[in-house]
Amino acid sequence: MIVKLEKVLAPHRVSTARDDLDNWGRDWTRSFVVAPSAVVFPETVQEVVAITRLANTEGFALVPSGGRTGLSAGAVASHGEVVVSFDRMNRILDFNETDRVLRCQAGVVTAKVHAFAEENGLFYPVDFSSSGSSQIGGNVATNAGGIKVIRYGMTRDWVAGLKVVTGAGEVLELNRGLVKNATGYDLRHLLIGSEGTLGFVVEADLRLTEPPAPSRVMVLGVDRMKDILSVLTRFQADVTLSAFEFFSELAVERVTRHRTLARPLESSSAFYALLEFDAQDESPALAAFGDSVASGWVSDGVMSQSEAQARALWALREGITESIAPETPYKNDLAVRISDVPGFLDDVEHAVGRIYPDLEICWFGHIGDGNVHLNILKPPGLAVTAFYERCDAMAPELFKLVAARGGSISAEHGVGMLKRDYLEFSRSAAEIEIMRAVKEALDPNGVMNPGKLLP
Ligand code: 2HG
Ligand code: ZN
């Protein structure tokens, strides 16, 4: 297999070195076996086609690999697969000013798209903490969301076209940058969020938009979760929000210690809401703040007066993941309808408290779109494996609560291997059967990312 791969690619772009396998064989998850048999670095679409065809004829499996920032083990190679890295397909190929669409290769880092858009007086609005290393191909494969979804939607909303190599090795040009196209099933959207199980995204056409107006950031202290939604409703009546995030006091405590940041407010609250809106909306925002205090929903608040202050307030939210990483949290990325969030948080607190009263929960996330990140922290004395075993044992209880509210077991991180066996809590048996049939049609020999997404 290696010799044949070396014929398809130059030998220096096929690696079996231990360090390379360890590095490219994993994402940000740490609890899965990492055991690829090789890592390959194609530079052209034709090379991706050749690798895929070889996998079909030789019977080996492929794992697409981007910036490896995933949190669901969608890009972990645990069973001798060949990892296909897009690190060398990292060019922006074209930009059309009239269409406001850029075409890039899958390995372009998200931040490079942000910078390119800015250089051209425009804006690419999909943004998240890992945008400095995540790649567009991975964003498309997981339909990445992030911190601006409330205003701009998910990656799906910004993809005007895709070039993909299916699991059978066919090249498809999907939608070709069109705004309107009513010619049947939109296969582009099938590939978006397919987690590398149907084929490789090799190029993407991304829409750009007007840059946002200068913004203000507010952090508000809120003691009762249900009041956060009253605050959201009150602000949304008069203010166009570009972010509405939340985090708990425990998260503030961890992130301020880890990054040596100042606390946002003098007093402490159970929760904090972080809002971002256009500076021109400052007066209605201050009125909404006044009403929220008068109604007893908000105890205190701060509003950025400069770019630096806005960045410092955002750091409180964006630094949470790295600040709790040493506590090897058991991560969950859940969604319910926005109005259901407070009830859902109560359900989960209650269930975790009943089963494991000694475990601490660090809540944060994108409450404005119903997506909450539940991180259960490992107590200091407990071994990592014993901790994950306890959490895994609790998972069905947790996902039942999600299912009871018609929610999603993965709002934005994807299913990967982490959630694969729980898919039935969010998708019906009929849906899963249809998903299998789709996979069969695009990847008849099952070479694309086996063991991910579908149980
Ligand atoms: C975020 O919103 C990311 O910061 C990571 O989706 C969430 O670490 C997490 O659980
Ligand atoms: Zn998130």
Image: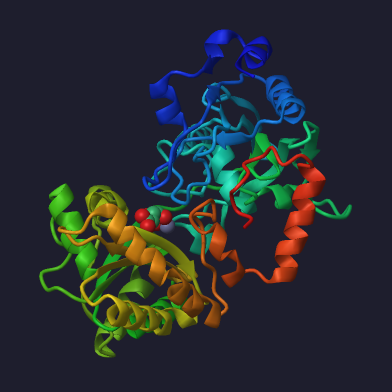
Determine which quarter of the picture holds residue 198. top right
**Residue displayed at 66% across by 20% down:** 44
Q: How many numbered marks does the figure carry?
A: 0
Query: Is residue 96 depicted above or below 308 in this figure?
Result: above
In this picture the colour scheme is rainbow
Left or right relative to 29: residue 3: right
Residue closer to the observer: 400 or 95 = 400
Residue 182 location (% of width, % of height): 86, 55
Quadrant of the image containing the C terminus: bottom right
**x, y (%) of residue 289?**
30, 77
Q: Nearer the viewer, residue 442 or 152?
A: 442
Left or right: 422 as drawn, with respect to 312: right
Q: Quadrant of ligand 1?
A: bottom left
Q: The N terminus appears in which quarter of the rendering?
A: top right
Does the rendering let one see residue 179? no
Residue at the image position 70 percent from the left and 70 percent from the top:
429
- Quarter location, residue 393: bottom left
Q: Quadrant of residue 295?
A: bottom left
Picture coordinates of residue 216, whole percent (x, y): 33, 59
- Residue reaching furthest bottom? 295
Which residue is found at the position 25% from the left and 89% from the top?
296
Q: Is 207 rendered above or below residue 404?
A: above
Decide if residue 386 is on the left or right side of residue 280.
Answer: left
**Image location of residue 345, percent across then percent down:** 37, 78
| Residue 302 visible in the current orientation | yes
